[in-house]
Image (cartoon, helix red, strand yellow):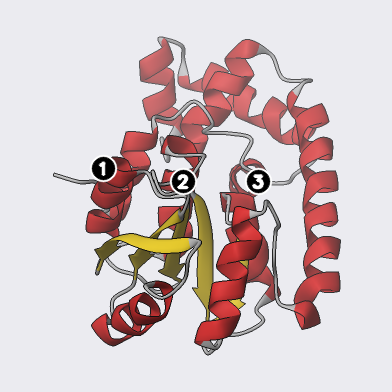
Amino acid sequence: MTGDGQAGVLLAHSQRLFRDAVRSVLDHEDDLVVVAEASDGMRAVVEAVRCRPDVVVTEQDLEPCDGVTLTRILADRLPESHVILLVDRNDEDALVEAIEAGARACVRRDVSIIGLTETIRGVVRGETIVPAPALGGVFARLIRRRDERDLVARLLATLTPREREVLRRLAEGESTSTIAQALEISKETARTHVHRIMRKLQVHSRIGAVMLVTRTGLIGDSLDLDDDIRGAACAPS
């Protein structure tokens, strides 16, 4: 909150017309105030760190990184800043991805200014908001993903520390030869580790093993967030 007790809002949107329209409305509200604007993801991170807004309104197709990536960065660095993501349609996969990234609300891009204002107030009150037509499907998908993560976590628990290291390196794109050299083991030993990983994870290929753990986000948790930012070209310079 600002010193006047208003909720501070950061508008991160590529179109100035949108930012101007939302600001013109919020400037007349007693409980909300626009504290910063950004036209791209890089500036959005800079402004969010600078002013620490209560709410960030951004779009799915923001460049140079998309809105979900920006949401993930802000959720990690500024968990007190709640993200509202504007999406093109009721795409359940996109909505689930956004919510898992940390978005507190997802609304259609064509939402009215009044509707967006009320969504901002809802987020300030601590609500999580998704489009009503997609609500049931989103929750069902979240539950399925949770169940899948639980299963994969149990399978990962059966791996030895060395097997987990080999799997992590596979997920980072290293070949069996590169893994063998890095771990100072023979290629045959590295291949044996890979086969045991496949058996324990109940998959039929190394690609299947990598897809299983990366899809659930259970490998790579130790990677530095700055690597993700650099990869998304979204870090402030």
Disc 3 crowd, CA 10 A, few/some/many (<14, 14-19, 20+): some
Amino acid type of disc 3? Ser
Q: CA distance from mark 1 to mark 3?
A: 46 Å
Residue occupying the point 41% across, 35% down: 174
Q: Which residue is mark 1?
A: 50
Which residue bears the numbered disc 3?
Answer: 205
Residue annotated with mark 2? 1
x and y, in percent, of residue 106 in the image: 60, 69
Taking 187 as reference, is 232 above or below it?
below
Residue 144 seen: yes
Figure quadrant of residue 233:
bottom left
Secondary structure of the residue carrying tag 3 is: loop
Quadrant housing residue 89: bottom right
Could you tell me if the residues under marks 2 and 3 are in contact, i.e. CB atoms within 8 Å? no
Real-space Cα distance between discs 1 and 2? 14 Å
Q: Where residue 149 appears, x then y in whole percent? A: 76, 41
Q: Nearer the viewer, mark 1 or mark 2?
A: 2
- Label 1 vs 2, first from the N-terminus: 2
Picture residue at 59% right of the left edge, 55% below the top:
124
In primary-sequence order, the first of circles 2 and 3 is 2
- The three-letter code of the residue at mark 2 reads Met
